[in-house]
Image (spheres, rainbow, N blue to C red):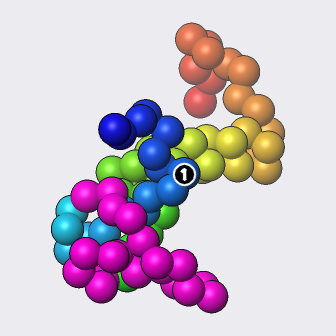
Amino acid sequence: MERPDYYSDKKFCDNCNDYVNYLMGLDTSWCVSCGERVRLYSPDDWDHFREHLDARKNRGGRRPRKNKGKESA
Ligand SMILES: [Zn+2]
């Protein structure tokens, strides 16, 4: 039975286009069904993840912009 938290023990295979069981290597993991390298997230999830990271990075690294609604150019 599949659970919502199966991300933790599955990785995304580009070749299968799905989250799959994988074999873990030293710094790479491989799909058990096709042998391709797998990644932690699907491209879609990865985009969301990076957006999230960028949002946090911008907030910490730059001056906070608090002028919501006010536009002074
Ligand atoms: Zn695969």
Query: Few, some or many C-alpha atoms within 10 Å of disc 1 (few <14, some 14-19, many ≥20)?
Result: few
| Disc 1 target residue | 8
Query: Would you place residue 23 above or below residue 25 in this image?
Result: above
Residue 60, image x, y percentages? 79, 43
Query: Would you place residue 15 above or below residue 9 in this image?
Result: below
Residue 51, image x, y percentages? 51, 46
* Residue 34 magenta: yes
Residue 59 lies in what quarter of the image?
top right
The type of residue carrying mark 1 is: Ser
* Residue 61 magenta: no
* Foreground of the two, 59 or 7: 7
Q: Is residue 3 visible?
A: yes
Residue 64, image x, y percentages? 76, 32
Residue 10 lies in what quarter of the image?
bottom left
**Quadrant occupied by the N terminus:** top left
Q: Is residue 50 visible?
A: no
Q: Residue at point 51% right, 56% down?
A: 9
Give the magenta range: 18-36
Query: Would you place residue 70 above or below residue 33 in this image?
Result: above
Q: Residue at point 58% right, 20% down?
A: 71
